[in-house]
Amino acid sequence: DIKPENVMLHEPAAGAVEVKLGDLGLACKSEDPAADFWQYGMTALCMLTGERFGARKYREESIDEFVGECRQALTAAETECGELDGALAASLHALPPLLDAVFRRRESMQDVASAPELAGWGFLDSDWTAPAAGGASPPGPSLL
């Protein structure tokens, strides 16, 4: 189940944050593959906008609205914090069109996993290594 309740954040060292997915409930194989797409999309929407997951239900006719809100959230973040740059900016700016494609089922979850903007970000424990100085570092791009 991809939903905010299953996104775990861990801070093993100052300034480093590890993101892990976990399912603390009883997992069962999805009977509705379409649900996997909208749950992924709504989770990403909520993470970008700060909206509580489940506050609104996914509706196909709301795709343009959802994607527009993601773009607005990125614009607001850049207005408040300054223009984003680097690998994090590329990943964040890729999310609205990626979500549009996911919601419309033009991209598979495999396509999402191999999206160039998301490539290199570690998601599994095996993706992380402990450098000599201590702490954890991802194999992929730096955050900024």
Image (spheres, grey):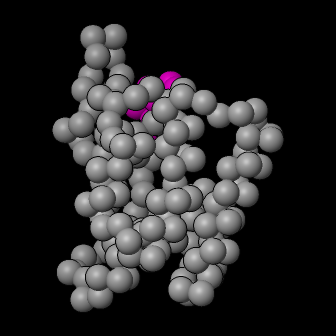
Asked whether 40 or 89 is in front, the reply is: 89
Residue 126 occupies quadrant: top left
Q: Is residue 127 magenta?
A: no
Q: Which is the main secondary structure of the residues drawn in magenta?
A: strand
Percent of width and height locating residue 15? 52, 26
Asked whether 75 or 25 is in front, the reply is: 75
Quadrant (top left, top right, bottom left, bottom right) of the C terminus: top right
Residue 38 occupies quadrant: bottom left
In the image, which residues are magenta? Answer: 10-16
Percent of width and height locating residue 82? 75, 32
Percent of width and height locating residue 115? 35, 50
**Going 73% across and 57% down the picture, which residue do you hit?**
72
Quadrant (top left, top right, bottom left, bottom right) of the N terminus: bottom left
Q: Is residue 11 magenta?
A: yes
Asked whether 90 or 1 is in front, the reply is: 90
Look at the picture and state if 12 lies above or below 70. above
Look at the picture and state if 81 lies above or below 28. above
In the figure, is residue 11 to the left or right of 23?
A: right
**Going 57% across and 47% down the picture, which residue do you hit?**
93
In the figure, is residue 15 to the left or right of 114?
A: right
**Going 34% across and 10% down the picture, which residue do you hit?**
133
Examine the rendering and report whether any part of residue 58 can be seen.
Answer: yes
